[in-house]
Image: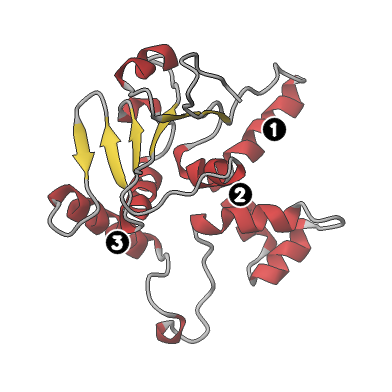
Amino acid sequence: MRTTVAFLAETPGSASVQSQEICLKPDDVRIFAGRKTFNQLGDILARKGIRLAPGDRVKVHDLSCLSQTTPMLIRAVAKLLKAGVSFELCSPAIVIEPNGDDRLHTLLDALDTHYRHMHGIKTHPPEMAQAGRKRILSPDKLPEIRAKLNEPGATTTDVAKALGVGRSTLFNYLERYDLDRRVNRQKKSVGSGPEDSSDQVEVPGPDPHRTRV
């Protein structure tokens, strides 16, 4: 049976989560993003024991609901399509299928390749890399880097050395890609805020009344 995951998120000026739920089907798995970004969807699903497979679908209301840079959003969608997962925008009624005949998929893949080329992100096997070329951290390594930083006694200097990059490079990488790190730093500067309600998930069941976990 195909799984459809609905990523529900709000940004200033976007539709509310309640409005977004109107276009969903009863058996859609609802992911309430809170402060999480779309490229963290895989981590959220993994923590909930949900694994997407070829033939599954991820849907969002429209792109205005996603607080993410355009290049990072293109990469996240292209990654889903390469895994055989389709992507749907509910409000404009656009569905991108993960096959070579879908022109939207082909366009996204081309834009992702262009972004990688322009910014020096590796797309070739290691044996094709130039000798002595400085290693570049890709956004996909963020979960691994977070895990290293959270190890007891770990320091930014040690983690940067293990990754083969400079300390300043690691700081710049975290500043660019780790939204939670920026949010936590801002919270420390202004004091504690309200409890985070992010990363909620709602899985359909036999009970007609939805239950949020």
Q: Look at the image and tell me whether residue 41 can be seen.
A: yes
Q: Position of residue 174 (x, y in %)?
A: 61, 49
Q: CA distance from mark 3 to mark 2?
A: 22 Å
Which is nearer the N-term, disc 1 or disc 2? Answer: 2
CB of mark 3 within 8 Å of CB of mark 2? no
Q: Tell me if residue 208 comes above or below residue 67 in the rendering.
A: above
Q: Quick one: SS at disc 2?
A: helix
Q: CA distance from mark 1 to mark 3?
A: 32 Å
Mark 1 residue crowding within 10 angstroms, few (<14) / some (14–19) / many (20+): few
Q: Position of residue 117 (x, y in %)?
A: 33, 65
Residue closer to the observer: 104 or 136: 104
Q: Quadrant of the C terminus?
A: top right
Q: Position of residue 147 (x, y in %)?
A: 70, 55
Residue designated by label 3: 113
CB of mark 1 within 8 Å of CB of mark 2? no
Q: Position of residue 154 (x, y in %)?
A: 81, 58
Residue designated by label 2: 174
Which is nearer the N-term, disc 3 or disc 2? Answer: 3
Q: CA distance from mark 1 to mark 2?
A: 12 Å
Residue designated by label 1: 184
Residue drawn at x 40%, y 40% is 69
Q: Quadrant of the N terminus?
A: top left
